[in-house]
Each structure stands twice: as structure tokens, then as C-alpha cells.
């Protein structure tokens, strides 16, 4: 099994909304536990795993700007929401016996460690799942961009983008049943066709660093390990 693993080091980008489950807000602990179980299963294949998590289940910075508020303040609030989610995911992983650490782009030493590339690589070398919080630490950048940035910094062989569907479609398949599903695209395809799987900065950064994006469904239990083992359903974005 070990020799057939597609990627030996990956970063998984999980949206904050994924942690809500069927709730309208906040964190469904059972969902966090299930995502943690998927990460544990993939890690048991011998894969180094790091995670970037969003904060949309708690707060989105653009919501402040849309109502006339200061976008920078709003984005800072959103960054704090990602820390809450990261701590929740770490709690679920630790419950399952998986050693995990949260590194934040915004310093808050009483709660978690501050991010540095060297520290993150050292934790990963020690066998820990590294969870990145706080986005990039800068306003106007999404957690998708943070995922691409951290994937490059960690030397990830692929960025796994966990979504609501099993790949990239030409349109929202929940609204358009005739939407075409793609098995493979290039980074330029995604950018030129305006496919809204990740923001432009994230796709461009992965393209420049030759990092494939693997888009899969967060709702399929065990799908992460299946894809790593050569099965499952996903769309691969690579050149």
C-alpha cells in the first residue's frame, strides 16, 4: 500500500462552513470528529498532513465591508474565527490519539503557537498534524490564498481542497443538473474559464510553485485516504 500513495506530503484546505454540519452557525463537534477521523486515516498511510481552515461558519470579514464597515477590521475578525476552528479541529484530533499543533499567523501565545516556516516543518518532522490558523495574517487575502501559501512553504506535493461537491464543475451542479464535471484541468483552465474553486491568487500561487490542486468532497467519509491510495472521485488541477 505504501508504495502506491499518490502524494507523500499534502496540505488540506477545509472551509469553516464544513464544520457547521446541518447547523446554521458554529461548530458541529460530530462533523469536526469525522473530519479528524479522515485526517487520521490518511495520516496512517504514511502521509505528512497540514491543514488550513477557514472561518466562514463564525464570521466573514467581507460582511463588515458590505455594510459600510472597515474591511481590515472585518478581516481581522475573520482571522480570529479561524483560530477557534483550528482549536476545535485540534481537539478532535487529540481525542483520537493524533498529535496536532495549531500555528497562528497572528500572535496569541496564551492560546497557540505563532507561525514560522521552520517551526511548522519541525512539528511536521516530529509526526504532528500542523493546523494553520489566522489566514496569511494579512487583510484582503482569503484562506484559500493562505492554503496555497502554506502548501508552498511546507513543500507540499499537492493542495487538497475540500468542497461541497466531488470535483470541479462547469457550473454549480446543485443548481444546474447539466453542469459538466471535469476529471482534470490545468491551472490556466481554471483561471481562464473563471471556475470558482479557489480565488485567483491561490490558483496563481500553486501554478507558480507547480503544486497540483486536488478538489474533492468533504462529505464523503474516508475520501481523502481513497484518493491518496489512487481511488475516489476528484478533479486534479495540474500542468
Image: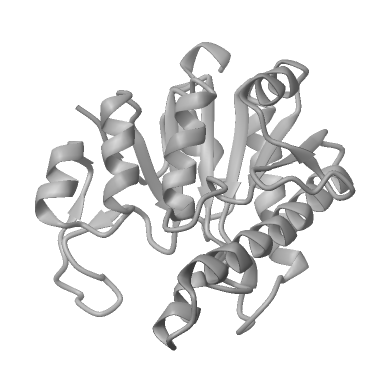
The image shows residue 224, relative to residue 168, as above or below, that is above
The image shows residue 7, relative to residue 74, as above or below, that is above
Q: In which quarter of the image is the N terminus?
A: top right
- Judging depth in this view, the residue of 181 and 185 nearest the camera is 185
| Residue 192 visible here | yes
Residue 226 image point, x, y percent: 50, 37
The image shows residue 69, relative to residue 140, as above or below, that is below
Query: Which residue lies at the image location 54% right of the left edge and 24% below the top edge?
Result: 154
- Extreme left residue here? 192
Asked which colour scheme the image uses, the reply is: one colour
Query: Which residue lies at the image location 61% right of the left edge and 79% below the top edge?
Result: 22
Q: In this view, does 96 lie to the left or right of 8?
A: right
- Extreme top residue here? 3
Q: Quadrant of residue 230?
A: top left
Q: Quadrant of the C terminus?
A: top left
Residue 182 image point, x, y percent: 20, 49
Query: Which residue lies at the image location 33% right of the left edge and 53% below the top edge?
Result: 198
Residue 27 image point, x, y percent: 71, 70
Residue 31 image point, x, y percent: 68, 64
| Residue 235 visible here | no
Q: In which quarter of the image is residue 122?
A: top right
- Extreme bottom residue here? 67
- Judging depth in this view, the residue of 7 and 191 nearest the camera is 191
The image shows residue 96, relative to residue 32, as above or below, that is above
- Judging depth in this view, the residue of 100 and 104 nearest the camera is 104
Q: How many marks can you see?
A: 0
- Judging depth in this view, the residue of 21 and 140 nearest the camera is 140
Q: In this view, does 196 lie to the left or right of 71?
A: left
Query: Which residue lies at the image location 44% right of the left edge and 23% below the top edge?
Result: 157
Q: In this view, does 194 lie to the left or right of 110?
A: left
Q: Is residue 84 left or right of residue 206?
A: right
Amino acid at each position: 500500500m505504501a508504495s502506491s500513495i499518490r502524494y507523500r506530503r499534502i496540505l488540506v484546505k477545509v472551509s469553516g462552513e464544513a464544520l457547521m454540519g446541518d447547523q446554521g452557525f458554529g461548530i458541529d463537534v460530530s462533523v469536526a470528529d469525522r473530519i479528524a477521523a479522515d485526517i487520521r486515516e490518511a495520516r496512517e498511510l504514511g502521509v505528512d498532513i497540514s491543514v488550513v481552515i477557514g472561518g466562514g461558519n463564525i464570521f466573514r470579514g467581507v460582511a463588515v465591508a458590505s455594510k459600510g464597515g472597515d474591511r481590515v477590521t472585518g478581516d481581522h475578525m475573520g482571522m480570529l474565527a479561524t483560530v477557534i476552528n483550528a482549536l476545535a479541529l485540534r481537539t478532535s484530533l487529540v481525542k483520537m490519539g493524533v498529535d496536532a499543533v495549531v500555528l497562528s499567523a497572528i500572535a496569541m501565545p496564551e492560546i497557540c503557537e505563532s507561525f514560522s516556516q521552520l517551526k511548522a516543518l519541525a512539528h511536521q518532522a516530529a509526526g504532528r498534524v500542523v493546523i494553520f490558523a489566522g489566514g496569511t495574517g494579512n487583510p484582503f487575502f482569503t484562506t484559500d490564498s493562505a492554503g496555497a501559501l502554506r502548501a508552498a512553504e511546507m513543500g507540499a506535493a499537492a493542495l487538497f481542497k475540500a468542497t461541497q461537491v466531488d470535483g470541479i464543475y462547469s457550473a454549480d451542479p446543485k443548481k444546474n443538473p447539466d453542469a459538466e464535471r471535469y476529471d482534470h484541468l490545468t491551472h490556466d483552465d481554471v483561471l481562464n474559464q473563471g471556475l470558482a474553486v479557489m480565488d485567483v491568487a491561490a490558483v496563481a500561487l500553486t501554478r507558480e510553485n507547480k503544486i497540483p490542486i486536488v478538489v474533492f468532497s468533504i462529505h464523503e467519509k474516508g475520501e481523502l485516504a481513497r484518493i491518496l491510495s489512487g481511488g475516489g472521485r476528484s478533479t486534479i488541477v495540474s500542468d
